[in-house]
Image (cartoon, rainbow, N blue to C red):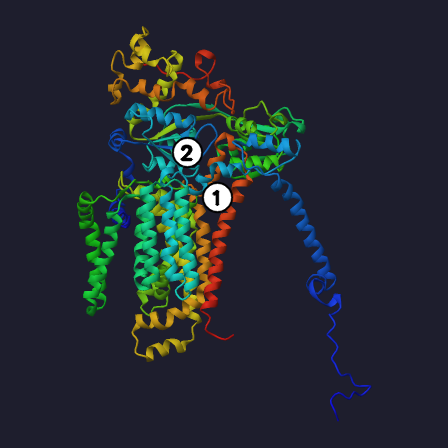
Amino acid sequence: MKKTALFGSVTALALAATGAMAAEGDTLKEVKARGVLNCGVNTGLVGFAAPDANGNWTGFDVAFCKAVAAAVLGDATKVKYVPTTGQTRFTALSSGEIDLLARNSTWTFQRDTDLKLDFIGVNYYDGQGFMVRKDLGVSSAKELDGATICIQTGTTTELNLADYFKANNMTYQPVNIDSNAEGEQQYMAAACDAYTTDASGLAATRAAFADPENHIILPEIISKEPLGPAVRHGDNNWGDIARWTLYALLAAEEYGVTSANIDELAKSSQNPEVQRLLGSSDDLGKMLGLDAEWAKRAIKAQGNYGEIFAATIGEQTPIGLARGLNAQWTQGGLMYAMPFR
Amino acid sequence: MSQTQSVAFVRDSMLPPEPPPTRASGAILWLRENLFSGPLNIALTLLGLGILWLLFSTLWPWLSHSVWNANSMAECRQIIAAAHGPDASGACFAVIKHRWNQFVFGFYPVDLYWRPVLAFGSLFLALAPVLFADNPRARRIVIGLAAVLTFLISAVLGANGVELGAMAVLLLAWVALIEARRDWALLATLIYPFLATWLLWGGTLWEPAMVLAGFVIGFFVWRALSAYGMFAFAAAVLVAAFWWLALSDIVARGIATVLPMRLTPVTSDQFGGFVLSITIGVAGIALSLPLGIILALARRSDLPVIKMMAVLFIEFIRGVPLITLLFVASLLLNYFLPPGTNFDIILRVIIMVTLFASAYMAEVIRGGLAALPKGQYEAADALGLDYWKAQRLVILPQALKISIPGIVSTFIGMFKDTTLVVFVGLFDPLKAMSDTIRASFEWKGAYWEPYIFVGSIFFILCFGMSRYSMHLERRLKRDHR
């Protein structure tokens, strides 16, 4: 260990000048050589990423990491989950510590351009909402004038809240909190009238209460929070792999390809789009630098988009989120995979 | 006149002493003198009692309703509602019972739990000859307890027969060594860090062994050339560096092919909970004390360059928050290192924590040095001792003794600061691990219980350090104040 340190500091000095080059390069080649995908995830967010009692990570974002690992390395378990905090996530990506960031991060202009990230799509359309106690007698966010509101600092939600109250000519008293757990505690202790965060988080929080029936989530959604996985600028092929893995999961749901029937469909499907997707005809994988069955493995890992949603955050889980905006475009949602052609 | 003749107005036997009046003795006296001695004290006592009652009456129902056996918060609530009525609130310590292993071991592989247990258990064997140098009874109790508990805990945590056998041999041999040959046991203490590194991270034994070999080689080079003063030291550093950079890898691989001595490797991201805190804490403590001494001496040095460097380092490090240093270690360094460099994150954090603590340590020790009367320095010079001998034999033993409370305070502060690693994505037991456990739906809403559990363990460890420091102060007391 000592030696690595010494060696490291010597090279650090030597390479200080060319430091910024570190992050660039052929990510696909690196991942293949390493044999493991370094995937940045949340340090713990109900339904999206959390380790169980045995330390195995599960969740909506984790499933995407697994799908990419299956597509690239052929094995969904070859993922090293790097827990990242709100502060470290983007730096971890741009410094090359992780290959892919799947950490419920909102796609914003500034992050896409100034931070030099490439959001490869949206895997969950979220929005900021409010939760209040029923006995407060409020049925709309417009009635929250003068309320005390628990708000997590340093997030986009903080800015959205200020914008929304300003636009509606209302005032509020912020109660600053540091984490979701603390927010729940403050809200339960009646330190604030309303608790605001992403609607998915509110649903999970409410579901975990002892008395969910005494709390309501107000109908207003005051912001757009398109959450998506991100890669860094400068390696377009790697971005394509991540993007089309997401589309493969979405397309699979659209065409009814599930982890259960995928082997059968790969052999017998007459739908040319499904054939191309599963690599039975044409070799789309080659254009990505992968083999023909990449998408088949990605879908098989944790199922298609709908299956992942249902298993991690859907209505059958305790979190109980409805598909809403995240339904397929054919079902009135926004999930729309680009054609596999 | 005979003795038996009695005079009417002189007593011939003493009356037995009367007990003092009840108001002037025992508990009542103590209460009157300490709690109710005047109007102000009466008011403060009543106020204190009121606050205590308030705390007790709010906390007691919650604690007394606590549930230890459940699989989720919802189940906890059901059990409490069934036993104490629908409105009762209660602690759900079932979360600790269910996830204790993550609080303690993080994501360390379950079947390898015996390795951190052995590493930290043998820490006491390594420290006992140093900490209890002149108190054989305390030493025997500590090493006996450490050895037995390490073995039993490992057995309970599922170490297999071979591992337990090897462990028993190691522990017994070490205990015997401490009791039979104290001076050799100190050598074992020096080897301990490398043994612990091997146990914690696994891999081949020869890697840490070759790092150790570098120190040994350097030492012998220095000894052989010691006639040449500073040149010997420089030569020793160069030879050791050459060994580490060029030769040690080849030699390690060579020996490993003959005798592998491999343990399953465990990567740093699998560390978490108290194993992580204690690893960083112990390494930081062990490294920051010598570094702090050197910095303190450097700051009091007569050589302007050395003095200035020490001042710059100390003032810079003390002027920067620890979190900044941790961010530098985890994020900024990545930009400077070539891609694919595996510069272990825990090692980076240990380096930063050590630098941080050593700056504070240096100032504490400088305080001790400054407190020594000038006569001590002059006496050492008058004895004809050179600088290092004077420091080692006369100055430092006294200065360090004076600084003990400050040194231990720095240790305790640093140990608690290890929880700050949460900000660089490591799983400290207090916040990161608790939040992560709350992120699984079944334990969402368990807020106070993890904090109480982790806080109590921190208290036990820090209180232990503080008690030891008091013991040490009493033991080293040479004056008659």
Q: Is residue B384 left or right of residue B374?
A: left
Q: Is residue B413 left or right of residue A295?
A: right
According to the picture, the residue beneath numbered tag 1 turns out to be B430
- Which residue appears farthest toward the bottom when viewing the image? B1
Looking at the image, which residue is at 30% across and 76% down? B385
Q: Closer to the observer: label 1 or label 2? A: 2
According to the picture, the residue beneath numbered tag 2 turns out to be A54
Instruction: Give the structural element (helix, strand or loop) at label 1.
Output: loop
Q: CA distance from mark 1 to mark 2?
A: 19 Å
Q: Is residue A70 above or below residue B205?
A: above
If the image is split into quadrants, where does the C terminus of chain A sit? Answer: top left
What's the mark number on residue B377?
none
Q: Are marks 1 and 2 in contact (CB under 8 Å)?
A: no
Looking at the image, which residue is at 42% across and 42% down? B156
Picture coordinates of residue B71, whole percent (x, y): 51, 31
Picture coordinates of residue B353, whole percent (x, y): 39, 51
Picture coordinates of residue B98, whole percent (x, y): 48, 36
Mark 1 burial class by Cα count in 10 Å: few <14, some 14-19, many 20+? many
Q: Amino acid at mark 2?
A: Asn
Instruction: Give the structural element (helix, strand or loop) at label 2.
Output: loop
Front one among A271 and B55: B55
Q: Quadrant of residue A61?
A: top left
